[in-house]
Amino acid sequence: MVAGCSQQEPKITLGVYSGRHYNTDKALYKQFTDQTGIGINLLEAKDKVLLQRLEAEGDNSPADILVLADAARLVKASDMGLYQPSSSSKLNEEVPANLRSPEGKWYALTRRARVPIVNPEIVDPKSITSYADLAKPELKGKLCLRNRKSPYNQSLVADQIILRGEAATAEWIRGMTNNVSQEFFSSDTPQIQAVGTGTCGIALVNTYYVGRMLGGQKGETNQALAEKVTVVFPDPTHVNISGAGVTAASKHPKEALQLIEFLASPEAGEGYAAANYEHPVKGLGDNDVLETFGPFTPDGVAVEQLGAKNKQAQALMEANGWK
Ligand code: FE2
């Protein structure tokens, strides 16, 4: 037992496997334990590691819930049989239908918009109103992209296939890759830095990375760079999620669902989202930095469909020059 802790050992302890890794998440798990007396045993690791581990552990896994970021990963875990279906009127009410699995296998806990950012000295923010605009020839040499290994990019392409069809999406990718003269990036933060310094005029990133930099989490230099960047919400905006479900191996599915209900509740959900500068599942949340980005209109595509189109998206990216 932890020094200074005078509480009784909890009767039930839930195993939480999480691909999220933010200290603020821990505060919420503690709040849940304080409210319910149910303990939490947290294992944080990369999504891939968690999936392999759950698969290897099988029915003996101590995990009761699995938290993952990105549509494709949630759908993959579901296809691997790692989640069990659950039913909760609370969750059906709190989480919009397109942001949860139709069988109740996973539920969104936060939303993450993937959008263009521009350096307004190089690209007029008003000239960008859709994802399609990134393929315009006048952006030649100005567009930077993260590589196609990023599940975030794969989900965005899947989203465009759903909304615009495969042929238009292929043409869009070709137009964008023609506009790229920099090497492809391996993560979002360096893209924001490059737009801030003017190395790139425009890039595609998840807004929370900009939020973290603006909020000072990455130091003063990064804060100053993020201030040079304008976030543009296309109409409509592609939205990805982080989410959780009860594992197939869970010995405490009722309590596990109770934890997910807690995390998705408006109060806890705001905290889960805001601390990492993500958007809650509904509304814009209570976060000063996010407010500066302004409102956006989500495109309403079902996250399940983003996962289902993942392979097609990857093939299309590879075939059309997305490195
Ligand atoms: Fe991320």
Image (cartoon, rainbow, N blue to C red):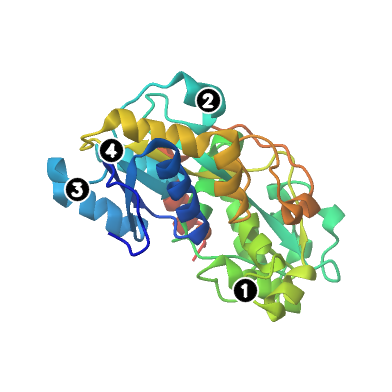
Residue 97's label in the rendered image is 2
> Are the residues flagged by discs 4 and 2 in contact, CB closer than 8 Å?
no
CB of residue at label 3: within 8 Å of ligand 1? no
Residue ID for mark 1: 218
Mark 1 vs 2, N-terminal side: 2
> Are the residues flagged by discs 3 and 4 in contact, CB closer than 8 Å?
no
Q: CA distance from mark 1 to mark 4?
A: 34 Å
Establish if 21 lies above or below 62: below
Give the residue at x 33% y 48%.
Answer: 40
Q: CA distance from mark 1 to mark 2?
A: 35 Å
Q: CA distance from mark 3 to mark 4?
A: 11 Å
User: Closer to the camera: disc 3 or disc 4?
Assistant: 4
Which three-letter amino acid code belongs to the residue tagged 1?
Lys
Mark 1 vs 4, N-terminal side: 1
Quadrant (top left/top right/bottom left/bottom right) for the N terminus? bottom left
Task: Locate residue 230 relative to residue 158 in the image: left or right.
Answer: right
Mark 4 vs 2, N-terminal side: 2
Q: Quadrant of residue 258?
A: top left
Mark 3 vs 2, N-terminal side: 3
Q: CA distance from mark 3 to mark 2?
A: 28 Å
User: Closer to the camera: disc 1 or disc 3?
Assistant: 1
> Are the residues flagged by discs 3 and 2 in contact, CB closer than 8 Å?
no
